[in-house]
Amino acid sequence: MKRKRNEQEPIPDPEHLTEEERVAGERAKLLFKTLRNETFSPDEKDALWNQVGETISQRKQRSFNTFWIAAAASVTLLLLAGVGYLVFYKDTARTMQEFAARGANGPDETQLILGDKRVISLRKENSSVEYKDNGALIQVDSSSTIDQQMAGDQQFNTLVVPYGKRSVLTLADGTRIWLNSGSKLVYPSQFDTRRREVYLEGQAYFSVKHSEDVPFHVYTRDMEVRVLGTEFDVSAYADDDYTATVLTKGSVELTGQSQSFFGSKKMKITPGTRAVYDQQRAALQTEQVDVQEYVSWKDGYLVLNSAPLTEILKKLSRYYRVDIILKQPKLAGVRFGGTLDLQENIRDILEAVSVTTGLNYKQQPNERRYVLEESTIKP
């Protein structure tokens, strides 16, 4: 039976406490005050209190004057285990997340935003950014070179790739990152000697340069991927209710970034595995998949293995920066297979979809909107 917190439980008489017990008591009171100020759920507060109660029950033979000492020790351990993790996450991923929020929303061109606030526009549909000379030089689209000031304090660069565009980023350590349409990547202007960390919104394929001593971390809004050197895809779009990682080579360790003390989940996955973090259930689940279905976009085509029509259309909308409306919702879950060549224009792609689904498509006066609907011509 769970022990519920009782606000009326007696507090030891301060006059009968030793100096050591009095100091411990004051610390415990401060910890409980901190707990009340934190945004924990009722279940989490009860769980913390139960831990304190269990610690106290194990010391029944001791004087009641040791209550606050036991409580302080129990709560301190829990706070170190839980709050320590949250503080760590705030100092790294959340800092980069703040930079991502400052990046341009919905630009027409890919943008590289440097730590000194310079904004470089990349006009190609498939652009490239490569860091050279340990990050001091940045080559853009193989045609121009930009000097980067290597300041003493840590600075972050942001690569913003709008819908309809793609970009390939090569970091100074040799790691290559393919960013899909509608993505942002925040990363230090120069990695330190202990950790390599980036923050992603959207989708990217990573080919991480191996370093035994300097692990590589990819953060999203609710997942952390830790690797030494491997290849994998991460999808973390804001309009999806999940974050997914698909591993093609090597191994990675995943951590679900729950805001709860007790919700952090870790697991390691092997090649051919897709791990999905469900935001509503705060749970990590895995399945064996054909990885090409999830990573082929970086090579300019889509492999479809029994993919729902609604997911196919969402991917096409992002890739080509168009709106695609399905007039028959009953077909949203119907699954299709095949390969779509993304080098073709959107009209050719929709023509192929129409042939496969038996639907017709038409373009709205707004050139970036297409409608898929049943044919009005009866056979």
Image: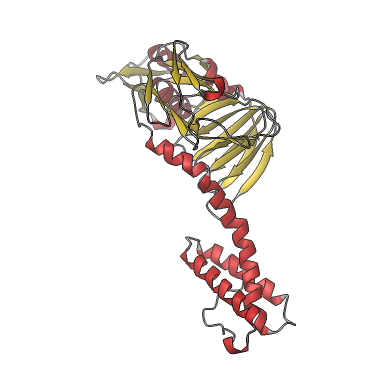
- The image's colouring method is secondary structure
Q: Say which quarter of the image contains residue 55.
A: bottom right
| Residue 252 visible in the displayed image | yes
Q: Position of residue 213 (x, y in %)?
A: 69, 34
Among all residues in the image, which is located at the extreme left? 365
337 or 139: nearer the viewer: 139
Task: Please report the residue visible at 32 percent of the width from the left and 17 percent of the height from the top.
Answer: 362
Q: Position of residue 254 (x, y in %)?
A: 63, 40
Task: Please report the residue visible at 68 percent of the width from the left and 75 percent of the height from the top.
Answer: 56
Q: Say which quarter of the image contains residue 328.
A: top left
Among all residues in the image, which is located at the extreme right? 61
Q: Position of residue 110 (x, y in %)?
A: 39, 22
256 or 80: nearer the viewer: 80
Quadrant of the frame with the C terminus: top left
- Counting the numbered discs, the total is 0
| Residue 261 visible in the displayed image | no
Q: Position of residue 288 (x, y in %)?
A: 66, 32
Image: 87 above or below 74:
above
324 or 32: nearer the viewer: 32
